[in-house]
Amino acid sequence: MLDELDDEDDGKPAAKKAAEAKVELEPEVVFYEGPPAKSEMIAPALSVFTVIGVIPFSAALIRQAWVRYTVTSRRIRVQSGYQGQDETELVYSDIKSMKFAWRNFGAAGDIVLELR
């Protein structure tokens, strides 16, 4: 019975055929791509009325302009710095644990990723 199966396979061993088979990954799906939440600018904008509040508001504006997040089905990528020159990318298998905290009544939040 096994001889019949080998004859149908053009005489190639099963291990060799498996090595020749192409592995196709499913396409990467983008869940989110864009800047941080705009709601994180509310508190710094309200603090502009004080002289010291100009600094946090300026930092929030720069963060909106220079930081971009991309969350896909395979990885998380953070582009930051002037014109996105600094890029950090990690795959989900590198994540050991994840913790998060909601801010602004659930409109935004912070995620802390612990890597292996």
Image (cartoon, helix red, strand yellow):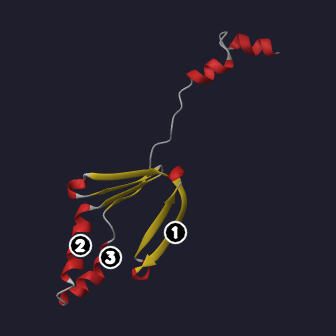
Name of the residue lying farthest toward the left = 51
Which residue is located at x 80 percent, y 16 percent?
Answer: 2
Residue 18: image quadrant is: top right
Tag 3: amino acid: Glu
What x and y, as percent, mark residue 26?
50, 41
Q: Residues within 10 Å of mark 3 (few under 14, many from 20)?
A: some
Which residue is located at x 44 percent, y 51 percent?
Answer: 90
Q: Earlier in the sequence, mark 3 or mark 2?
A: 3
Residue 78 is left or right of residue 13, and the answer is left
Residue 81 is left or right of residue 2, and the answer is left
Secondary element at image label 2: helix
What x and y, as percent, mark residue 93?
54, 50
Q: Which residue is mark 2?
A: 59
Q: Which residue is mark 1?
A: 99
Q: Which residue is mark 3?
A: 40
Q: Earlier in the sequence, mark 1 or mark 2?
A: 2
Alpha carbon distance from label 1 to label 2:
25 Å
Tell me, yes or no, whether the two marked residues, 1 and 2, touch with CB atoms within 8 Å: no
